[in-house]
Image (cartoon, rainbow, N blue to C red):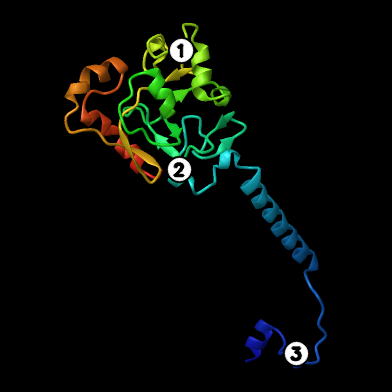
Amino acid sequence: MGDDEQKFGDKETDVPSPETAKRSCRDLLCLIVFLLAWAVWIVLALMVFTDGCPNHCNDPMKLVYGTDSNGCMCGRKCTDLNVDNTGKKRLYLPDPRDPYSRLCLATCPTAFAFTKDEAVKQGTYVCAGNACMLGGASVWFYNQNKAGGSSVAAPLDNCFLPTSNSTNCWYPSYPTIDVLYKCIPSLPANISTDSESLQAAGLPSSIGSFGDSLSTLQSPG
């Protein structure tokens, strides 16, 4: 026992009582630093949710509405991108073969449209900034064409053709149905009667080619 006592030190004989022991605040500095760290994290979180995420990038509704080719959410106005999708909540792929080509529309196209007049009415057009929102899209587009802007005088403005200006052109459209704000292709079983018009417009001429867009439109990511 003597060896043990010498090894572990003297036996304690005076144990303080919790009721009578003097208590005091300890590690006050560490507590203050801890609270300050939490305050900083809260401020950073608020900044991320407000100013740190441009174009509503943290909005869960993006899984429903989708985004256009510019990265602007459908149904939103993205000031820094100079894009206004207000009232345009439907996601549409003008080229079913290209998932990165996306437009936001007010309503999904319900029929084939192979002319500029029809495309402007359905909203399947592209223009620089918000210019096409001024005074009506059709008026703006027609004024760009010195020949008068008719569908006959402006076939080269087709976005699919190499003669078009990528910032000022229109897309031929195909029939779709609105499913959860996505324009899903709804083509007739036999589209061979329109194959020549489809090829001339730059669209796929077979139903299988339109199926490429389904995986993109049906995936939340």
22 relative position to 189: left or right: right
Q: Look at label 3 and name its amino acid.
A: Pro
Q: Which mark is residue 35?
A: none
| Residue bearing mark 1 | 149
Q: Residues within 10 Å of mark 1 (few under 14, many from 20)?
A: some
Circles 2 and 1: CB distance less than 8 Å? no
Residue at mark 2: 65
Relative side of 20 to 91, left or right: right
Is residue 212 positioned above or below 11 on the image? above
Mark 3: few/some/many CA within 10 Å (<14, 14-19, 20+): few
Element class at badge 3:
loop
Q: Nearer the viewer, mark 2 or mark 3?
A: 2
Q: Earlier in the sequence, mark 2 or mark 1?
A: 2
Q: Is residue 118 above or below residue 39?
A: above
Residue 194: x %, y % from top left: 22, 22
- Mark 1 or mark 3: whose residue is earlier in sequence: 3
Q: Which secondary structure lies at badge 2?
A: helix
Per the model, the C-alpha gap separating discs 2 and 1 is 32 Å
Secondary structure at badge 1 equals loop
